[in-house]
Image: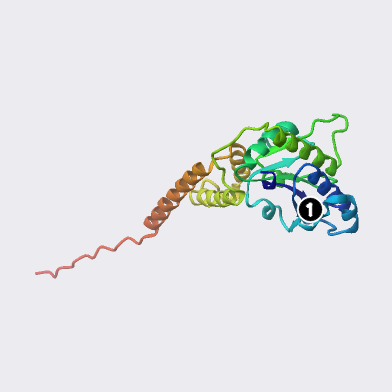
Amino acid sequence: MLDNIRIVLINTFHPGNIGAAARAMKNMGLSQLYLVEPRVFPDDEADARAAGAKDLLESAVVVNTLDEAIADCQLVIGTSARNRTFDLPIFDAHDCARKIVGEAEHGKVAIIFGRETMGLHNSELQKCNYHVYIPANPEYPVLNVSAAIQLVCYEIWQAHSKQDYVKRDEPYPLTRDMERFYEHLENALRKTRFIIPQHEGKVMDKLRRYFNRSRPERTELNMLRGILTSIDETTTKLDAAETKPTPIQSQDKGSDQ
C-alpha cells in the first residue's frame, strides 16, 4: 500500500531539502520520490541530509513536468499554507492521510509540495483533487518544505499502522484519463459553440475544478466520454447537412407550337 504513495517536489531550490525529504519519507515507510525540475540534483548536500535514506535519492524519478509525475495517479493532493481563489475540498493532514491510505490500496496517490519561496502555482493546484494544510500558528503558518513532508508522512504512517482509514472499492480514473476527458470536453464545447473563441472566459478552468472536486468514478467517466462521443457524431452530421450543396432543379423549356 505505501509503495503506491508518492511524494512529488516541484522546482526544489535547495538540494538539502531533497535529502531531508528522503529521510522523512524513509522514517515513515514511504519510498516513492518524484522530482519535477529540481534546481540542483544530484548533489552532495542532498546525500548528506538524506543520511540513511540515500537509496531513495538513487531511485528518485526526475521528470520535466508535473503532468509526467502524476499521469498514472488516481488521487492527487496539493499542499498549501494559503487559501486560494478557487474552491477545492480542504483537509488537515490527519484527515487527508486517512483518505490517502484508503485509496492507496487500489491505485497510486501523489502528494505535491511546491517551491520553497512560493509553494504551488494556482495552475498546479488546479490539477489536484484535494488541498491539504497543516494547522499551525496563524501568525506564521509557513513550514519548511522538508518539515511539512515529515508531518504529512507521519500522519500517513499513523493511519496505515492503526488501520485508521476508509476502504474504497470502486476505482477512480487515472490523471491521464481525466486529461483526455478534459481535452474531449473542450473540443465538444467548441463544436457546439458553447465556448466562443472571442469570449472564452474561464469555462474550462471552472469545469476542470468541478470534475476534480467531484471525482467521477471510472465507470462514470466512461459514461461521460460516451455522451461526448454522441455529441461529436451529432454535430458532425449537422455540419455535413449544412454544407451539402442543394441540387439545382432543371427546367424543361418546350418549343412553341
Q: Is residue 30 left or right of residue 139?
A: left
Taking depth in this image into account, of 165 and 114 the one nearest to the observer is 165
Which element type, helix, strand or loop, lies under badge 1? helix
Q: Residue at x 83, y 47 (%)?
A: 23
Q: Is residue 229 left or right of residue 126?
A: left
Q: Is residue 43 left or right of residue 199?
A: right
Q: Which residue is mark 1?
A: 56
Judge whether residue 165 can be spotted in this image.
Answer: yes
Taking depth in this image into account, of 243 and 164 the one nearest to the observer is 164
Within the image, what quadrant is residue 24 found in? top right
Q: Which image quarter is the N terminus in? A: top right
Q: Percent position (x, y) of residue 141?
A: 85, 33
Q: Residue at x 55, y 40 (%)?
A: 216
Q: Percent position (x, y) of residue 169?
A: 55, 38
Q: Count the marks: how many?
A: 1
Judge whether residue 80 can be spotted in this image.
Answer: no
Within the image, what quadrant is residue 120 found in? top right
Q: Residue at x 63, y 40 (%)?
A: 103
Q: Percent position (x, y) of residue 187?
A: 53, 52
Q: Residue at x 91, y 55 (%)?
A: 45
Q: Is residue 177 left or right of residue 131?
A: left
Q: Which image quarter is the C terminus in? A: bottom left
Q: Residue furthest top?
A: 138
